[in-house]
Image (cartoon, rainbow, N blue to C red):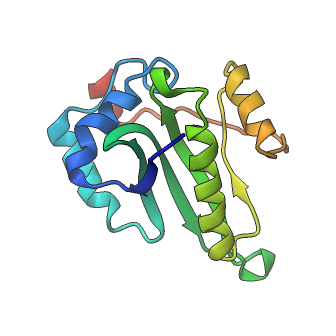
Amino acid sequence: MQDLTIREATEADLPDLLHIYAQPEIDNGTVLALAEAREYFRRLRYYPNYHLYVATVEERMVGTFALLIMDNLAHLGAPSGVVEDVGVLPAYQGQGIGRRMMAYALDLCRRAGCYKLTLSSNLQRTQAHAFYESLGFQKHGFSFRMELQTPDSEDRG
């Protein structure tokens, strides 16, 4: 993929980010309103070592991922990385963008001294699993999830 740039997201990127998140594999068309997304984005700046990245081709946003590098007391204090919210626009899938984004995340984790990078993927996303395995990710253990209902989440449906 020529002219691919990966950089930290800015507030100006939010409309395009919401468009990527609206994909069926991510949020299935239900995304935050822009004003609410701005509020959350501003709060994210206060999370230590949490960054939202975008991939652009000729200045058009085509992909995104979030990366948290968290400190640990176990593993002799070595940090670990967690990737979330990976998405590439359908028209750009299969062109190496996701591969480059994950290489970027891995490089950031290596430079931070992380002992691992983890991610989770819905069991039904078999193509995504094959993609992650092609990058060298291995299935390890189980991922458990519990949906939590809060007053805010009830309002969102």
Give percent across and percent down for residue 26: 48, 27
Residue furthest out toward the left: 35
The vertical placement of 39 against 132, above or below, is: below
Quadrant in the picture for residue 46: bottom left
Task: Pick whichever, 3 or 88, lies toward us.
Answer: 3
Residue furthest out toward the bottom: 76
- Left or right of 71? Residue 66 is left
Whether residue 53 can be seen here: yes
Task: Pick whichever, 144 or 109, lies toward us.
Answer: 109
- Left or right of 10? Residue 63 is right
Q: Residue at x 81, y 46 (%)?
A: 136
The vertical placement of 146 against 118, above or below, is: above
**The C terminus, quarter of image:** top left
Whether residue 151 can be seen here: no
The vertical placement of 108 against 82, above or below, is: below
Counting the numbered discs, the total is 0
Give percent across and percent down for residue 81: 63, 61
Quadrant in the picture for residue 120: top right
Give percent across and percent down for residue 155: 26, 27
Q: Residue at x 79, y 37 (%)?
A: 134
Q: Residue at x 45, y 47 (%)?
A: 3
- Left or right of 24? Residue 107 is right
Quadrant in the picture for residue 140: top right
**The N terminus, quarter of image:** top right
Give percent across and percent down for residue 13: 26, 45
- Left or right of 140? Residue 85 is left
Task: Pick whichever, 119 or 143, lies toward us.
Answer: 119
